[in-house]
Amino acid sequence: MDFQTEGNSIVYKNADGAVLAHVDFSEVMSGVYDIFHTEVDASLQGQGIAGKLVARAVSEIERRDGKLLKDASCSYAAAWLKRHAEKGVSQ
């Protein structure tokens, strides 16, 4: 799968360039990020795409020397972060 970083989003596009999945995050205060939306097209659901998107968002935030909010606005991302507690989160 080919995921791309576009600004504050990680996206997956099909061969025609249509976005089939994405995760969005924003810097809510200096160096602290919130993952606020994850969406996967029905044709890709159940394949672990959302988890891969969130993992890539976390990596991108870390690459920017950022921290994550403890409770992400996106319910999927919040659950993913709890399951992967080794990832750095801000209080």
Image: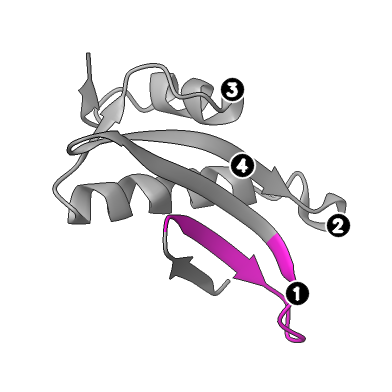
Residue at the farthest left position? 65
Q: What's the CA distance linking mark 4 and mark 3?
A: 9 Å
Of mark 2 and mark 1, the one earlier in the sequence is 1
Give the residue pinned by disc 3: 75
Decide whether residue 12 is among the magenta residues. yes
Give the residue pinned by disc 1: 18
Q: Which numbered dot is residue 39? A: none
- Callout 1 touching callout 4 (CB < 8 Å): no
Asked which secondary structure carries label 4, the reply is strand
On-image quarter of the C terminus = top left
- From this view, report whether residue 36 is shown above or below residue 49: above
Of mark 1 and mark 3, the one earlier in the sequence is 1
Of mark 2 and mark 3, the one earlier in the sequence is 2
Q: Is residue 84 left or right of residue 88?
A: right
Q: What's the CA distance linking mark 1 and mark 3?
A: 25 Å
Asked which secondary structure carries label 1, the reply is loop
Q: Which residues are magenta?
A: 8-20
Q: Position of residue 61 (x, y in %)?
A: 28, 48
Q: What's the CA distance linking mark 1 and mark 4?
A: 16 Å
Give the residue pinned by disc 2: 43
Residue at the farthest right position? 43
Residue at the farthest bottom position? 16
- From this view, report whether residue 3 is shown above or below residue 91: below
Q: Is residue 38 left or right of residue 16?
A: left
Give the residue pinned by disc 4: 38
Q: What's the CA distance linking mark 2 and mark 4?
A: 15 Å
